[in-house]
Image (tube, rainbow, N blue to C red):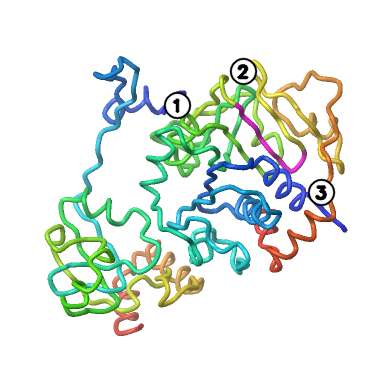
């Protein structure tokens, strides 16, 4: 079956989820939402909590619009668990993954979600802020970040502002449309490169210097994964972010 | 909040203290106290006992944080309805300053399960009205619309 960056990213994020995890996605998150539904469809046992109060909503109901803050992530839930409760859950160390994205990231895993250009008080562009990233990154067990546009404006040498930063003591993973980065000794390294691209393309699109000479090829999606993906996402909401 | 530039930048909101229980360093965040919270619900009685039927987001928390809470509601219901299922009452009357009957009040946004599709044209018209300073005309044009 054919696949592209959207399918590859959804599959890669789904593979980051482990049995027994409690996993959260927020708003404007079509790729992680699809990844969580895919992991459910593949039979992975984990708990799905969302911004719309849902707990393990019925993943077989396909999303029809790109918003991830709708009844689709609520209907068929076994319980109602609000966002305030999710933040408490995270603060008590029991949330494994909160899928987050960013506007700028540097090699040390500093994430900017606050502003670009100018100053904090008089920014050129004001960004959404740190409600999710600043509060959840320090307390979730594994930081798992996605970014659908891997280029030099997002993977930068130095962020304008660190809304949050990686904790070197914890697993820190970034899945882009080109590759998977993981944090080693406080610095991001290319863990593996997606089959349709190359380390050279990753280097050309990354704002900091990548010194490594080779990286593993990330395993392509399997037929089973792609078939399940088509089943749970028939309206291809996964493309909204591309 | 560890690792965030926000902590040093906004001392009026963030403060690092040692936990009195464990000695662990802890970021304290100052509570936000909005002057008003305006919360749209599906059902409410005349006293302000408000039901949220569906996702509630941080609405109940907002009602507890704000100095004054205004409820706008799709329907007014009798208090006897609330007594049937007290757990569905997300905001109790004593936190509520005023109740406004406003069917369609969340448009051009959504209100589960009454209307579940964002009205894109309506959203654009609203944004244009805010930008052009013609919000009053926009609101007048929408009066009585459900």
Gap in angstroms between the C-alphas marked 1 and 3: 36 Å
Secondary structure at numbered mark 3: loop
Residue B116, position as x, y percentages in the image: 47, 73
**Residue B122 sits in quarter:** bottom left
Q: What residue is disc 1 on?
A: B4
Q: Start and end of the magenta stretch?
A: A171-178
- Pointer 2 local density, CA inside 10 Å: few below 14, some 14–19, many at least 20: some
Gap in angstroms between the C-alphas marked 3 and 2: 29 Å
Q: What residue is disc 3 on?
A: A221
Q: What residue is disc 2 on?
A: A186
Q: Nearer the viewer, residue A188 or B19?
A: B19
Q: What quarter of the picture does the N terminus of chain A occupy?
A: bottom right
Letter of the chain that mark 2 sits on in the rendering: A
Q: Is residue A167 left or right of residue B58?
A: right
Q: Residue at x 66, y 59 (%)?
A: A240
Q: Is residue B27 above or below residue A35?
A: above
Queried whether the magenta region covers residue A172, the answer comes back as yes
Secondary structure at numbered mark 1: loop
Q: Are marks 1 and 3 on the same chain?
A: no
């Amino acid at each position: 079956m054919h696949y592209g960056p959207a399918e590859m990213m959804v599959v890669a994020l789904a593979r980051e989820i482990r049995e027994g995890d409690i996993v959260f996605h927020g708003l404007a998150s079509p790729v992680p939402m699809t990844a969580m539904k895919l992991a459910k469809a593949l039979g992975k046992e984990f708990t799905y909590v969302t911004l719309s109060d849902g707990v393990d909503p019925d993943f077989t109901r396909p999303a029809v619009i790109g918003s991830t803050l709708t009844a689709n992530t609520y209907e068929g839930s076994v319980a109602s668990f609000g966002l305030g409760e999710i933040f408490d859950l995270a603060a008590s160390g029991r949330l494994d993954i909160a899928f987050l994205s960013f506007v700028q990231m540097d090699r040390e895993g500093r994430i900017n979600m606050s502003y670009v250009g100018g100053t904090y008080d008089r920014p050129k562009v004001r960004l959404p802020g740190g409600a999710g990233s600043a509060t959840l990154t320090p307390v979730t067990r594994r930081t798992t970040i996605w970014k659908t546009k891997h280029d030099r404006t997002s993977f930068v040498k130095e962020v304008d502002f660190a809304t949050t930063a990686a904790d070197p003591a914890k697993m820190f993973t970034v899945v882009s449309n080109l590759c998977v980065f993981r944090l080693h000794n406080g610095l991001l390294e290319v863990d593996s490169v997606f089959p349709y691209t190359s380390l050279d393309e990753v280097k050309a699109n990354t704002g900091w210097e990548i010194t490594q000479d080779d990286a593993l090829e990330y395993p392509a999606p399997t037929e089973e994964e792609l078939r399940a993906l088509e089943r749970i996402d028939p309206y291809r909401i996964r493309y909204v972010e591309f | 909040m560890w690792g965030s530039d926000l902590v040093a930048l906004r001392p009026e909101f963030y403060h690092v203290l040692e936990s009195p229980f464990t000695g662990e360093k802890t970021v304290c965040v100052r509570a936000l106290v909005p002057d008003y919270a305006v919360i749209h619900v599906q059902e409410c009685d005349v006293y302000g006992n408000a039901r949220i039927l569906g996702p509630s987001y941080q609405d109940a928390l907002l009602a507890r944080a704000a100095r004054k809470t205004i409820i706008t509601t799709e329907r007014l219901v009798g208090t006897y309805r609330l007594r049937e299922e007290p757990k569905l009452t997300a905001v109790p009357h004593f936190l509520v300053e005023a109740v406004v009957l406003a069917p369609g009040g969340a448009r051009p946004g959504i209100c589960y399960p009454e209307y579940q599709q964002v009205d894109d044209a309506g959203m654009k018209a609203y944004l244009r009205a805010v930008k052009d300073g013609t919000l009053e005309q926009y609101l007048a044009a929408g009066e009585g619309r459900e």
